[in-house]
């Protein structure tokens, strides 16, 4: 059974253009499945499609060592799909040659943005569109776990309308409770397709173990040229306990056994391989606001929960607030891909979870995972200082809208988007 992915709507217009397309995301997120689905659709429409994976040694050697022979092999095809493109040495240079000398549509994928975005991108300027491809979103999870709620959400709430959300679009208590319950199911094991499709908790944990040890850590270990992954695992486990907190490099160094330079290198690789994401502070006054400290979030909460060996329900956890803040970051990253997410914190301790810079100014976003109206003092302080037009408070199942100063503040359940 093929499961429709939300990115398809964004991707399809670019499949009709000459430029190459790159799907960047972690292993096992479903890139290969999507590309094979695209290939099947093209073939049904009479197009000739060649699917190649550079994990296959013979294909990799042909592409790397004999590009003219590779070109002869594929030049009669309308579309060539190359999976795991990051394995190709000088892949960007070779892809540029093929692009410039054939009329083929190229689609590539890779699990390391370090290789694809920077090494390939510098040769393919103006010739390549890249798309971030991640594990299932909550809506994609619902399409498998609760099709009734999935249909209802899609019918009533457009994901593109997040900052324009109107309170009249909210659901009643029964639906809100059901949505919140499903969201809490989702955040326990995360969104990797093989995990979502597994039936039992023990099966989901075993699949997560396989994904992390056989794919994610193996790739990172190779990129860092590590003899063992002990330091990497210690660092990853420590980061998983610090979700949403300010990164302290001395603590990271002590916890992992790595020196400062190695910590930076490991963090960079963890980010480039879609394990974590780092965000920086929003500031306008260096004297009163934090300007350098980073915060970290995990791209998939199932991975994070596996690293700390905690798959309990939310109501039984001491870290529930951090978990939902991490989920909120992942949600906002999908909903507002062109906006750089930051956080705001003053040296006196006032803090807003996220700040999004838009064409209309800045928008503060707070996570208050509760069923009642909660507005913190820091949120008021931000509105007073920066005069935003819109602010958002993400809740469990409370929704509404009100004016605070001149800002329209929207209360939106996290499960709605």
Image: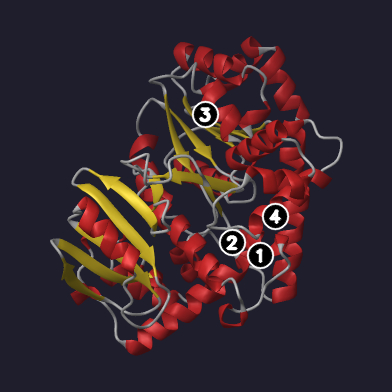
Instruction: Give the residue furthest to the right.
Output: 227
* Residue on which disc 2 sits: 301
Q: Earlier in the sequence, mark 4 or mark 3?
A: 3
Name the one closer to the observer, 413 or 201: 413
Quadrant of the snapshot with the N terminus:
bottom right
Whether pointer 2 and pointer 1 mark residues with C-beta atoms closer than 8 Å, the reply is yes
Q: Earlier in the sequence, mark 4 or mark 2?
A: 4
* Residue on which disc 1 sits: 305
Provide the secondary structure element on which disc 3 rests. helix
Is 174 placed left or right of 292 in the picture?
left
Name the one closer to the observer, 210 or 393: 393
Quadrant hosting residue 245: bottom right
Name the one closer to the observer, 297 or 147: 297
Give the foreground label among 4 and 2: 4
* Residue on which disc 4 sits: 238
Residue at 45% across / 39% down in the picture? 131
* Residue on which disc 3 sits: 117
């Amino acid at each position: 059974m093929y499961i429709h992915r939300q990115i398809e709507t964004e991707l399809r217009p670019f499949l009709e253009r000459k430029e190459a397309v790159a799907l960047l995301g972690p292993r096992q997120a479903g890139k290969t499945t999507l590309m094979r689905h695209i290939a099947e659709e093209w073939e049904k429409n009479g197009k000739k499609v060649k699917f190649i994976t550079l994990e296959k040694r013979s294909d990799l050697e042909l592409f790397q060592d004999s590009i003219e022979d590779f070109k002869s092999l594929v030049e009669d095809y309308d579309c060539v799909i190359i999976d795991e493109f990051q394995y190709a040495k000088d892949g960007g240079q070779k892809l540029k040659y093929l692009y410039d000398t054939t009329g083929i549509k190229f689609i590539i994928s890779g699990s390391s943005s370090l290789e694809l975005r920077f090494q390939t991108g510098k040769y393919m300027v103006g010739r390549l569109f890249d798309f971030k491809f991640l594990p299932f979103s909550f809506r994609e999870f619902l399409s498998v776990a609760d099709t009734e709620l999935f249909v209802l959400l899609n019918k009533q709430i457009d994901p593109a309308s997040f900052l324009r959300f109107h309170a009249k679009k909210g659901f009643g208590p029964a639906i809100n409770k059901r949505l919140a319950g499903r969201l809490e199911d989702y955040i326990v094991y995360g969104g990797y397709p093989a995990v979502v499709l597994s039936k039992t908790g023990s099966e989901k944990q075993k699949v997560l173990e396989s994904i992390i040890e056989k794919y994610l850590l193996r790739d990172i270990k190779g990129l860092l040229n590590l003899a063992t992954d002990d330091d990497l695992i210690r660092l990853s486990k420590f980061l998983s306990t610090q979700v949403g907190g300010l990164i302290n490099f001395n603590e990271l160094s002590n916890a992992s056994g790595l020196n400062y330079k190695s910590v930076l290198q490991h963090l960079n690789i963890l980010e480039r391989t879609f394990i974590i994401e780092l965000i920086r502070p929003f500031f306008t006054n260096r004297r009163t606001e934090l300007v350098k400290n980073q915060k970290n979030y995990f791209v998939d909460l199932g991975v994070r929960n596996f690293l700390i060996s905690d798959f309990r329900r939310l109501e039984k956890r001491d870290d529930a607030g951090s978990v939902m803040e991490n989920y909120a970051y992942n949600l906002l990253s999908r909903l507002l891909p062109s906006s750089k997410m930051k956080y705001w914190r003053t040296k006196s301790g006032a803090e807003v979870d996220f700040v999004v810079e838009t064409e209309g100014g800045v928008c503060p976003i707070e996570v208050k995972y509760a069923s009642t109206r909660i507005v913190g003092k820091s949120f008021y302080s931000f509105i007073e200082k920066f005069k935003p037009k819109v602010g958002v408070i993400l809740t469990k199942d409370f929704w509404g809208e009100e004016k605070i100063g001149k800002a329209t503040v929207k209360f939106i359940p996290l499960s709605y988007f």
